[in-house]
Amino acid sequence: MKLTVINKERPMVCDDILTQYAELLIGTCLGISKGMRLRICCETLHRKLARLTAIEAWRRGAREVVVQYTDPLLDKAAIVSMDDVWLDDVSEFIRDEYGRFAKDGWSSLMIMGEEDPEALEDVESARLQRYDRSRSIEFKPFLSAMATNAAPWCLAAEPTEAWAMWVFTASDRAMPADPLSTLWEVLFPILRLDRPDPSSAWLANVLSLDAKAARMTKLRFDSLRFFGSGTDITVGLSPSSCWKSCLSATREGKRFTPNIPSEEIFSTPDARRTSGRVTVTRPVRVMGVMVEGAWFRFEKGEVVESGASRNAEALAGFLASEIGVRRKRPRDPRDARGGVRLELIG
């Protein structure tokens, strides 16, 4: 698959590939049809893909499409500059807007890929925590609607140059001459954009994953044991636990896939039966900053110790920020990547 270089600063994939991607997102991942409403959220670097997805949604009969652009650098300026008393404040206008998105059943597409992956690195963690927490509380109705599949939603990846450079740097790989194009080339087969019909190929993939999840459910494993470098943790399962793929459905039975790419199947643990130590083998974003070398020790489903080699204070602040966050959350098998092995116990 060839990339078209628009300029030396910003190489991009050609428009026909982005158009195919938009069709995949709107048609197969979200299932937009006549009369539906769609909210698209992304940084300004993604405006071409946002525009193409909006056009595709209208082509399929969408009633309304709203694009909301985010800017982490503007968020940083707000957190650093605003009066301390306003860090915990969110206007009724913003609160009501997100409430209406939830109440009126808007579908959501979030295009992920940062202009600056480390934009919030040097922000004071206490101010960042207050700013983030207040907005999480005010947006809760909208986030709850997504969590309960009240309407279709999807997180989709689109690489940026800064993200591509960060990926190669963080993984200790040689920096290619054109990191953005190289990252796109990695993603093409994962997103099925290298196939004659990407939408059909993606649907076939998720249906295959769903069949594998159904087979795992029938086996009724008692627990999962993850072990590898720095990790040896056992996660107990409930007798009623089911395995799922990324194939989801709304309450009315409308099918959608909430993230792309996705190759996982997953289940829900018994929160009381998790014990051991787990090491996160790759950097993760916590409260806007990148945490590296994170580790946790669980006893009876609760984090009793934790740490990190970088930005440990952000991780500690996150663990202390909400009631129950130290309690074991549903295990995503993607956590087993990076050299960790999985043992299924019947």
Image: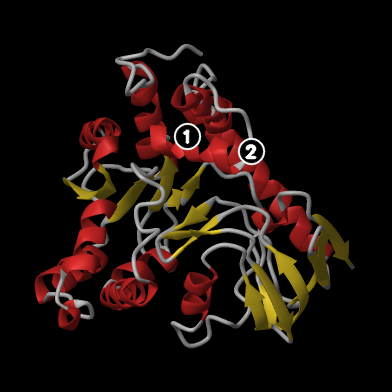
Looking at the picture, how far across and down is residue 266, in whole percent?
A: 66, 59
Indicate the secondary structure of the residue bearing disc 1. helix
154 in relation to 141, above or below = above
Q: Residue at x 21, y 42 (%)?
A: 62
130 in relation to 123, above or below = below
Indicate the secondary structure of the residue bearing disc 2. loop
Residue 150 visible to the viewer: yes
Identify the disc placed on residue 269.
none
**Tag 1: Cα neighbours inside 10 Å, few (<14), some, or many (≥20)?**
many
**Residue type, label 1:** Ala
Between marks 1 and 2, how big is the CA–CA gap? 13 Å
Looking at the picture, how far across and down is residue 90, in whole percent?
A: 17, 75
Q: Residue at x 53, y 30 (%)?
A: 187
Q: What residue is pinned by disc 2?
A: 172
Along the line of sight, which residue is nearer the eye, 295 or 214?
295
Q: Residue at x 21, y 71 (%)?
A: 99
Q: Residue at x 81, y 71 (%)?
A: 223
Looking at the picture, how far across and down is residue 2, in whole percent?
A: 47, 11
Quarter occupied by residue 127: bottom left
Residue 158 visible to the viewer: no
Looking at the picture, how far across and down is residue 48, in whole percent?
A: 25, 30
Quarter occupied by residue 219: bottom right
Asked whether the residues under the numbered discs 1 and 2 touch, taking CB atoms below 8 Å apart as contact, a structural biologist would say no
237 in relation to 342, above or below = below
Quarter occupied by residue 172: top right
Q: Is residue 66 left or right of residue 274?
A: left
Residue farthest along the right direction in this orientation: 346
Along the line of sight, which residue is nearer the eye, 219 or 189?
189
Counting every numbered tag in the picture gives 2
Q: What residue is pinned by disc 1?
A: 164
Which quadrant holds the C terminus?
bottom right
**Tag 2: Cα neighbours inside 10 Å, few (<14), some, or many (≥20)?**
few
